[in-house]
Image (cartoon, rainbow, N blue to C red):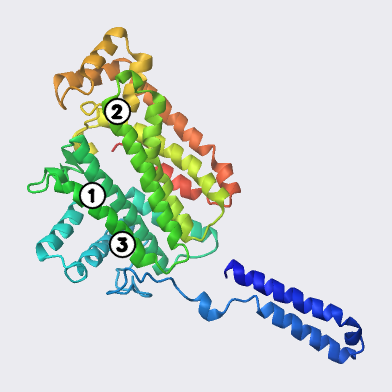
């Protein structure tokens, strides 16, 4: 109901009450058996005037500027999707992805006049880039959303689980386009155990357009599946803001190429990982589950955000540690942080607090200037070990774990289930890859 009709109805109610007050003496002459029904009838009419017409409340907003040829489906959009089995979440989640890829691409020759070669390119590009990860972010949307719904006394329906899985894949596709672009900018070699997309024959700089394509497909999926939902604008706002936060983190990261090693501070590292990783990898999955569950309280989102961002920062410190010390076959990629002059947790700790002047001079000479798997790179890793970074990291990991647990009371006081934070923490604490 808009503000203007409310004012009009309040004004008409006031006028009606004024008329009744002005005729009080006449009304007092009526017998009680006539007066009381009259007053009740007038009160009922006033109350009914504030009830929005049923047909108006059911209206959904259409998009005539873009629906000119192919209207959006208003119901049953996920009816053809495979059943989501909570007992086999990974298998069910992957099956939803298959349906989304088909849904996004099958009509492109008709809707966007794409020749079959370009249509096949998009299908192959999606198959190559959006699959193959651990899917933790996407699965967390389903898990956290289901936990929140149950905490509200609602058992998730089959369609609830499919909705959450679709949103989970929106995050996975968001990550995919970021990684396609990031690998190109960083000159990375492998991703998820296979050559980076831009390294494939015939791709190269086309990878940048492919990254944009995956991003736009995220918004097409959101529109197709959620445009009739009351929280559709909330989803758009959340994805757009999170993407901007991530791009701010990416800029902080890329600008490291233009500053000296002395400016690689802990504060800068924390800003990079908070914005580049923590918002989209940790806060976004849970915030999406909260949105689908109908949570609108600002305090609830604030309470969830704090431990999730802290977890994201810890996760990236983990990633930096694994980049240097985990075997490539376990990590699923060849670590390039030293070659790429990354402002990483290991480097900022060693350079500013732990290295001798001789070790620091070696870092000044070779950090960001040596190739992967060279003698100079190995010497830098040896310095990290020599200054005790492995032990320092173990202590940092324990402290981060305890700091996250300290938010439990704040989360539960906001009427949120702590389990939605706890299951995330269990997935990342002391991970090996």
Q: Does residue 87 sit above or below 25 in this rendering?
A: above
| 145 with respect to 170 (left or right) | right
Distance in Å between CA atoms under marks 3 and 1: 15 Å
Q: Secondary structure at mark 2?
A: helix
Distance in Å between CA atoms under marks 3 and 2: 34 Å
Q: Position of residue 250 (x, y in %)?
A: 32, 38
Tell me the tag on residue 322.
Answer: none
Q: Position of residue 104 (x, y in %)?
A: 24, 64
Tell me the tag on residue 256.
Answer: 2
In the image, what residue occupies the spot 37% across and 45% down?
244
Looking at the image, can residue 141 be seen? yes
Q: Can you identify the residue that label 1 sits on?
A: 211
| 158 with respect to 82 (left or right) | right
Disc 2, disc 1: CB below 8 Å? no
Q: Secondary structure at mark 3?
A: helix
Front-lying residue, 307 or 62:
62
Characterize the local packing of mark 1: few (<14), some (14-19) or many (20 or more) Cα atoms within 10 angstroms: many
Q: Can you identify the residue that label 3 sits on?
A: 220
Q: Secondary structure at mark 1?
A: helix
Q: How many numbered tags mark residues here?
A: 3
């Amino acid at each position: 109901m808009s503000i203007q009709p409310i004012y009009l109805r309040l004004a008409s109610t006031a006028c009606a009450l004024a008329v009744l007050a002005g005729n009080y003496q006449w009304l007092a002459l009526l017998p009680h058996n006539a007066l009381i029904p009259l007053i009740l009838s007038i009160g009922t009419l006033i109350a009914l005037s504030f009830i929005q017409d049923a047909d108006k409340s059911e209206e959904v907003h259409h998009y005539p500027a873009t629906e000119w040829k192919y209207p959006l489906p208003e119901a049953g959009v996920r009816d053809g999707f495979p059943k989501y089995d909570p007992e086999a979440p990974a298998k069910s989640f992957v099956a939803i992805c298959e349906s989304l890829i088909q849904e996004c691409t099958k009509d492109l020759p008709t809707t966007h006049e794409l020749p079959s070669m370009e249509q096949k390119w998009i299908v192959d590009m999606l198959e190559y880039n959006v699959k193959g990860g651990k899917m933790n972010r996407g699965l967390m949307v389903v898990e956290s959303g289901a936990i929140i719904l149950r905490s509200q006394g609602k058992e998730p329906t089959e369609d609830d689980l499919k909705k959450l899985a679709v949103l989970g894949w929106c995050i996975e596709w968001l990550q995919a386009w970021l990684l396609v672009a990031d690998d190109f900018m960083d000159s990375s070699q492998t991703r998820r155990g296979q050559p980076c997309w831009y390294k494939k024959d015939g791709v190269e700089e086309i990878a940048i357009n492919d990254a944009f394509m995956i991003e736009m497909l995220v918004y097409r999926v959101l529109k197709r599946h959620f445009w009739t939902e009351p929280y559709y604008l909330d989803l758009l706002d959340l994805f757009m803001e999170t993407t901007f936060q991530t791009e701010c983190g990416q800029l902080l990261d890329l600008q490291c190429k233009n500053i000296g090693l002395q400016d690689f501070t802990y504060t800068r590292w924390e800003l990079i990982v908070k914005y580049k990783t923590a918002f989209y990898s940790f806060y976004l999955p849970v915030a999406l589950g909260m949105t689908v569950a109908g949570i609108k309280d600002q305090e609830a989102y604030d309470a969830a955000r704090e431990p999730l961002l802290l977890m994201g920062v810890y996760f990236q410190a983990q990633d930096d540690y694994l980049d240097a010390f985990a075997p490539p076959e376990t990590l699923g990629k060849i670590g390039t942080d030293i070659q790429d002059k990354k402002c990483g947790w290991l480097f900022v700790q060693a350079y500013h607090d732990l290295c001798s002047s001789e070790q620091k001079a070696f870092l000044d000479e070779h950090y960001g200037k040596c190739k992967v798997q060279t003698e100079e790179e190995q010497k830098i890793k040896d310095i990290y070990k020599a200054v005790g970074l492995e032990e320092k990291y173990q202590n940092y990991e324990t402290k981060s774990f305890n700091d996250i647990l300290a938010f439990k009371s704040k989360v539960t006081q906001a009427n949120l289930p702590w389990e939605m934070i706890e299951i995330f923490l269990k997935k990342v604490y002391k991970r090996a890859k």
